[in-house]
Each structure stands twice: as C-alpha cells, then as structure tokens.
Amino acid sequence: MVISSCRKDTVPLVPPGQDTAWTISYPGHFPTPVYNFENNPLTKEGFELGRKLFFDRILSANNTVSCSSCHLPEAAFAQRGHDLSHGIRGNLGIRNSQPIFNMMWNTSFFWDGGSNHIEVQPINPITHPDEMGNTLEQAVKAVNEVAAYREAFKKVFNKDQADTEGIMKALAQYMCFMISAGSKYDKIQQGVAGYQFSQNEERGYMLFKQHCNSCHTEPLFTDHSFRNNGLALLPNTKGAIDLGRGVITHLDSASYYKFRVPTLRNLKYTSPFMHDGRYETVSVVLEHYRKHVQQTPNLDPQLAHGIPLSDREKDDLLSFLNTLNDDNFVANPAFRMP
C-alpha cells in the first residue's frame, strides 16, 4: 500500500524479501519525518496489529478503556466535546486529549512534552491511574491470553509472545501511518488544479503569516516548542495550577506554564481547545489573543500585547483556518475500528 503524494522521495518500510510491501509517501511541502521506521519496518500486518490494539480495551486494567476512548476517529483522533480526558472508572484527567495525526514529525508528545519518542509515548496512558490504570506487565499478560494476538506477534515480529516492545512498535506503525495532508491548503500548496484561496481565505493567510506562523509553523502548523500563551492560571481538577512543561523540568522555573504548541490542522473536529479545553470554539480562542492575554510569568514575548485583529481580520483568519480541515482523513475507513 502507498500513501500517494507528489513527493518523489519515499520511505522504504519493508526489508527486501518480505511479501507485504508498504511505502509511505508524504507531500512535497512537508519536511522529512523525525521517525523513519528504520528499527520498526512497516508491514500491513504490523499496521493492522497496531490498529486492533488501539481500539481494544484489553490494555486497560478493567477492560473498559481503549486508546480510542479519548482519541476518536470522527474527531481527528481527539475527544470532541470533552474539555478533559475521561479514563478508567470515570476518572477525569487534567488535560484535553490531543488529536493524533502527522505523528512522524513530532519531536515530543503530550502537552508537557513528557515523552520524546512515539515508541515510548503509549506507556504513559496505559499506566496512568486516571487513564487506563494498568501496569505494563498486566497489559502484556492480557494480550498474550488471546491466541489471535500471539499469532499476530509471531507473524509481525517473529516473537512467540507479545512483549512491551512489540506492543509499542505496533501502535507506532498504526499511528504514524495516519497522515493528514489532504486539506484545501495542502492541495493549493501542491498546485492541484481547481483549488485556490477565496479572497477572504487569502487575506486570512496573509494575517496568519504575519501573526501566527512563528509558533504554528507551516506546513505542520506547529513548531513543536513550549510556550506560555497568556492563559489565566486556573486550578485543575486536582486543585493545582498546571505547570505545563515545568512538570517535566521540575526545578526549571523558566519552563513553568508553558505548553506544547498544538497543530492548527483539523480544528473543525477537535474542539474544545487549549491544554485544559477551556475554549469551545476557534472564535473564542481568537478573542483570547485579541483581548484577554494575561501577563503571567514566562509569557511568550510575542504575546506581550496580544494579537491586534479587527473584526474583519478575525473573520478572514477564521476563513483561512477552515482550509486546514482534512475531511477525507477523518472519514478514512482504514483508520477506523477493525
């Protein structure tokens, strides 16, 4: 299988001699991915194993929560309509569930960057007491109790049983395969005939490049950095102020209240917004930047005076952001429950 694109160079994913050859291609306006599958060759069977694990509640402590519980295909793999993640036994997390796509380009994961590798990232939700509430040992044990999984791990990884490494690699194959690059913006960047910005969208694009692109950098619409965007410091569900990146760096107070810059792709599907889901719509988000940026410690200097936008400019910017929605990605049956 091939993900089609206009980019000439592709990433070979299956060693010579194997009979299932998949190749990932990516658009010519995308940079080279961070994750290259060098130590995790992508196969159809590996992708399908990862997809099955992603939707299977078997990884949680009481078989009630799967990865897809908080990352829904119809919401671009976010949890639309929920400000905070919902986990095992009805537990609430302290942060909004982020969407899953274009993961091959990520340099870190989670709002605080607590993981720096996609093959390690799933460990956190599996073992977090407010998410899947399990141990790796129990998760592996549960998977190995299913004969079909043992057979799949033998075929994909030539292992008689599942192990943590294999589970992580299978999930990585599935998640990395999910590339969202079919929006109107992408088609225009690739020069596809019949696609051009409207006047409103074009004006919005110019405003975006003037006010937003330094953090939400094209074409992924994130620079993967950690920044304080001037939100009011409100107590979370645990009664504490979320330190963001400071949770990871601990004693480095310069990182307090900074969060990973999210992508602006597929905003149509991924509300609510911000690390704690406090804003329901993109319009309200822009109002924050226009009028409500708070002078909190470590505020990004670029936001010291907010982002001045007239009502018309706001409407134009919203029009441009709508060109970043990829309806075909969200509807793709290859990513749905097997």
Image (cartoon, rainbow, N blue to C red):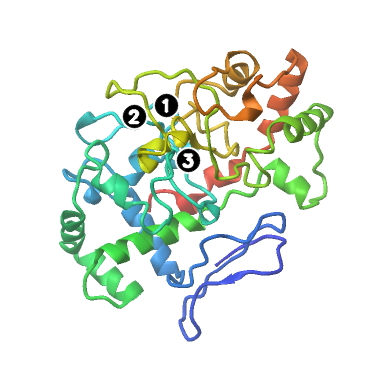
- Is residue 167 in view from this perspective? yes
Q: What residue does disc 1 label?
A: 276
Please name whichever residue, 336 or 37, is drawn nearer the observer in this view of the structure.
37
Residue 126, image x, y percentages: 27, 48
The CA distance from mark 3 to mark 1 is 14 Å
- Residue 94: image tag: 2
Residue 49 versus residue 116 in the image, above or below: below
Q: Residues within 10 Å of mark 2 (few under 14, many from 20)?
A: many
Residue position marked by numbered label 3 in the rendering:
99
Numbered disc 1: secondary structure: loop
| Crowd band around label 1 with a 10 angstrom C-alpha radius: few (<14), some (14–19), many (20+) | many
Residue 314, located in which quarter of the rendered image?
A: top right
Asked whether the residues under the numbered discs 2 and 1 touch, taking CB atoms below 8 Å apart as contact, a structural biologist would say yes
* Location of residue 229 in the rendering, given as x and y in whole percent from the top left corner: 55, 27
Question: In the rendered structure, are the residues bearing label 3 and label 2 in contact, judged by CB atoms less than 8 Å apart?
Answer: no
**At 17% from the left edge and 58% from the top edge, which residue is drawn?**
137
